[in-house]
Image (cartoon, rainbow, N blue to C red):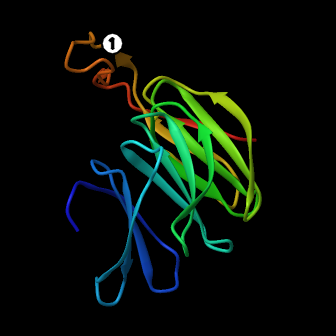
Amino acid sequence: MGGKPETGVSHGKGKVFVLIEDTGEEVEIDAATYKILNRWKLEGGEEPSGLAMDRKTGRLFIGCGGNQMMIVLDAAKGTIVGKFPIGRCDGVGFDPKLKLAYSSNGEGTITVVREINAGKFELVENITTEPGARTIGVDTYTHKLYLPTAQMKPVAATAENAHPRPQQIPGTFHIVVVGK
């Protein structure tokens, strides 16, 4: 497959979609044979790391932390059908009943995008969470979001790394819960 595989998702119909973080690609794989069926360059997306799917409409929601952009991709054609500004994303979740995609961003926000239909999307809001809460789980029954994190201590930026990840303070792990 090449590159640095990041996140994968299955659509339940014999295909798996995998992000390649360092090349900015989405790869479609046959789940039975492991053969690569398609490789799509994510134009306008750098360092894709978060991935979720609406299995009914075949839309992939891809969080690109490198340039802070969510790309919505038609999984059947590999075409981009939407783009939205987000934060420094690491995880993406999708709630199929609410038709909401969530980008969890390391600076302490969740960007919420609504899928109105297979070709129309809208930015709903940015929810404040906590710095470091960059991975996400979506409970599709209660519609709550779960973001594991810890208290963080800042790390100084350098010429080589303008946005270093903060370091976790030992013993401070907790889960941020968002929802009613």
Tell me the quarter of the picture where residue 17 sits: bottom left
The answer to whether any part of residue 138 appears in the image is no
Residue closer to the observer: 154 or 26: 26
Task: Read off the residue under disc 1.
Answer: 154
Mark 1 neighbour density, 10 Å: few (under 14) some (14–19) many (20 or more): few
| x and y, in percent, of residue 69 in the image | 52, 39
| x and y, in percent, of residue 146 in the image | 55, 44
* Side (left or right) of 38 relative to 72: left
Q: Is residue 144 above or below residue 154?
A: below
Q: Is residue 140 above or below residue 43?
A: below
* Side (left or right) of 15 relative to 120: left
| x and y, in percent, of residue 5 in the image | 27, 58
The answer to whether any part of residue 14 appears in the image is yes
The residue shown at (27%, 24%) is 170
| x and y, in percent, of residue 27 in the image | 37, 67
The amino acid at mark 1 is: Pro
Q: Across the whole image, how many numbered discs are drawn on residues? A: 1
The residue shown at (42%, 37%) is 65
The residue shown at (57%, 29%) is 109
Residue closer to the observer: 104 or 60: 60
Quadrant the N terminus occupies: bottom left
